[in-house]
Image: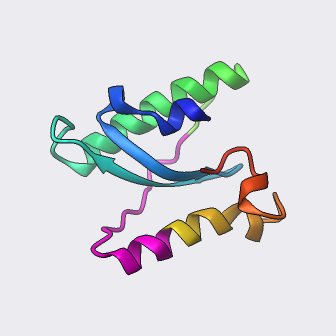
């Protein structure tokens, strides 16, 4: 999953993420050369992530639902809350005892 964390060629940083069996969460920070709308950024990120995941799984079926939810992080307190939520997701779902044990979480 290091490839997903080092997305400089994708024009976004992804410092924290988790990929779950039926959804994913990520904090994305676009750089100045990224597309200007969130929709364009997510289209790029989801497209490239899908390509990577399909190479790993050899699956060719649909991967993403059309619906997505965004949330702007406005301060350090909110940042920490979002990081905790992302990291706790696989633990809450019973996929790992700690977030560090989940191979798809950073």
Residue 69 lies in the magenta-colored region:
yes
Q: Residue at x 58, y 33 (%)?
A: 2
68 left or right, relative to 88: left
28 left or right, relative to 94: left
Where does the image place residue 82, in percent across and percent down from the top left? 48, 70
Q: Which secondary structure is most common in the magenta stretch? A: loop
Colouring: rainbow
Q: Is residue 72 positioned above or below 37 on the image?
A: below
Where does the image place residue 71, in percent across and percent down from the top left? 36, 68
Q: Quadrant of the N terminus?
A: top right
Residue 63 lies in the magenta-colored region:
no
| Residue lying at the far bottom of the rendered structure | 77
Where does the image place residue 54, in percent across and percent down from the top left? 62, 24
87 left or right, relative to 92: left
Q: Is residue 34 positioned above or below 66 on the image?
A: above
Q: Is residue 59 visible?
A: no
Image label count: 0
Q: Residue at x 35, y 75 (%)?
A: 76
Quadrant assignment, res 52:
top right
Where does the image place residue 103, in percent across and percent down from the top left? 73, 44
Magenta range is: 64-82
Q: Is residue 84 visible?
A: yes
Quadrant assignment, res 75:
bottom left
Task: State the residue in front, 72 or 76.
Answer: 76
Q: Residue at x 38, y 51 (%)?
A: 28
Q: Residue at x 81, y 58 (%)?
A: 95
């Amino acid at each position: 999953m290091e490839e997903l964390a080092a997305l400089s060629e994708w024009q976004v940083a992804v410092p924290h993420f988790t990929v779950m069996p039926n959804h994913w969460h990520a904090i994305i920070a676009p750089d100045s050369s990224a597309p200007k709308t969130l929709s364009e950024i997510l289209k790029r990120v989801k497209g490239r992530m899908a390509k990577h995941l399909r190479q790993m799984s050899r699956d060719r079926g649909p991967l993403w639902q059309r619906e997505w939810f965004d949330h702007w992080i406005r301060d350090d307190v909110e940042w920490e809350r979002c990081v905790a939520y992302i990291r706790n997701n696989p633990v809450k779902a019973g996929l790992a005892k700690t977030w560090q044990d989940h191979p798809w979480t950073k």
